[in-house]
Amino acid sequence: MAGKVTVLRLSHRRSRDVRVTSHCALVSRAFGADGFLLCGERDEAMLLSANKAARKWGGGFGADYCDNPRKFAREFDGAKVHLTMYGLPLMAEIGKIRRRLAKENLLVIVGSEKVPAEFYGIVDFNIAVGSQPHSEVAALAVFLHELFEGRELEKKFANAKIRIIPSQNGKNVEKT
Ligand code: SAM
């Protein structure tokens, strides 16, 4: 695939979203995205922890802060997807999105509180991972899994300081 995938997390609130936003970043990295942008309240501790995990477990993933998500999304050079239960069914649209990623970058937007209506118009695809309310973490995981057709689970993370040797019994971890 030619393009890079960036996940943009809207409207982070330090008081209540730290765990869910951190999980969005971890899922983004583990499921094949290249970068993560935090919007809403600035949260250096959250970004530090995401980047620390990325250095430890390897790969080129990085997390950063974005102070103007509207401008960033409007000016993004590539295809834009917003994950929302009100959108079109994932399985009907994912082929088109994969074809876009084959030739350009992809921005994947997830919300926390109510997503401003403007975002629905800025993006190329409003995508529902089922038309029921659930979670940005689940929506992101399923979306990326379908986008990469499962190949993300076999991704190699270069320059890892730590690596799990899959095992039936107990924890087998290799430090490099
Ligand atoms: N009430 C909010 C709204 O109206 O946008 C949504 C809150 S939901 C807990 C937070 C985020 O999870 C959403 O912005 C969306 O990105 C994601 N999400 C939740 N359910 C989803 C679904 N069925 N399909 C796609 N994304 C979903």
Image (cartoon, rainbow, N blue to C red):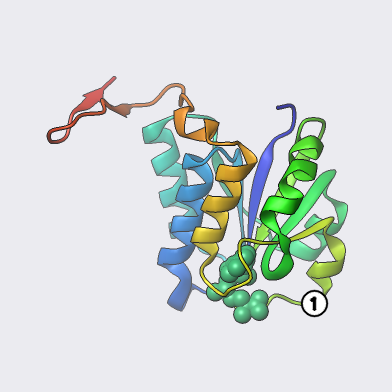
**Relative height, residue 112 to residue 64 (above, below):** below
Pinpoint residue 15: horizontal percent, then vertical percent: 44, 78
Pinpoint residue 92: horizontal percent, then vertical percent: 74, 52
Closest to the observer, 96 or 42? 96
- Residue at x 60% of width, y 44% of height: 146
Closest to the observer, 96 or 70? 96
Closest to the observer, 126 or 149? 149
The quadrant in which the N terminus is found is top right
Pinpoint residue 119: horizontal percent, then vertical percent: 79, 68
The local secondary structure at tag 1 comes to loop
Pinpoint residue 137: horizontal percent, then vertical percent: 50, 60
The quadrant in which the C terminus is found is top left
Instruction: Check disc 1 and give the amino acid type.
Output: Ala
**Relative height, residue 111 to residue 97 (above, below):** below
Residue 21 is left or right of residue 115, and the answer is left
**Residue highlighted by disc 1:** 117
